[in-house]
Image: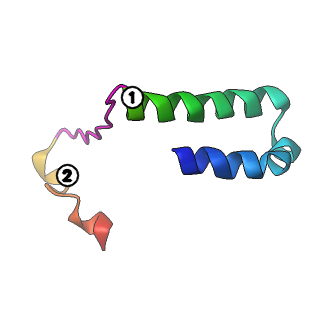
Amino acid sequence: LRHWRKRFLARRGEALTMYDERFCRMWEFYLAASEVAFRELGHMVFQLQLTKKQTAAPLSRDYLCG
C-alpha cells in the first residue's frame, strides 16, 4: 500500500485530468489509512467465494497463480 500511495502521489497530476480534486483527496486518504491500518493495527484481508452449489467454484485458488 505504501508503494501504491507513492506511485499515486507521483502521478497525481495525471489523475486530476481524469478525476476531480475531491476524488483524488479521498483516494489518497484511503491509501494512507489502509497502509497504517495494515501496518500498525494488524488488519488482514480475506476473500470469500460463496456459491449455492459446491461444484460451482474450484476448491482452491491455484488457478490464479499460474
Say what secondary structure mark 2 lies in.
helix
Which image quarter is the C terminus in?
bottom left
Q: Give the residue furthest to the front.
A: 40
Residue 62 located left or right of residue 28:
left
**Could you say which quadrant of the image residue 41 lies in?**
top left
Up the image or down, 36 lies above or below 12; here it is: above
Q: Image height check: is 62 above or below 17?
A: below
For discs 1 and 2, the disc positioned in front in the rendered view: 1
Q: Are marks 1 and 2 in contact (CB under 8 Å)?
A: no
Percent position of residue 47, x then y:
29, 41
Q: Amino acid under label 1?
A: Glu
Residue 54 falls left or right of residue 65: left
Q: Looking at the image, which residue is at 64% across and 28% down?
A: 29
Q: Which residues are magenta?
A: 41-52
Q: Quadrant of residue 44?
A: top left
Q: Which secondary structure dominates the residues rendered in magenta?
A: loop
Question: Which residue occupies the foreground of this view, 52 or 35?
Answer: 35
Q: Nearer the viewer, residue 63 or 33?
A: 33
Disc 2 crowd rating (10 Å Cα; few below 14, some 14-19, many 20+) is: few
Q: Decide which of tag 1 and tag 2 comes sooner along the chain.
A: 1
Q: Nearer the viewer, residue 2 or 29?
A: 2
Q: In the rendered image, which residue does mark 2 sit on?
A: 56
For badge 2, the amino acid type reads Ala
Please give the residue where the numbered disc 1 appears in the rendered image. Answer: 40
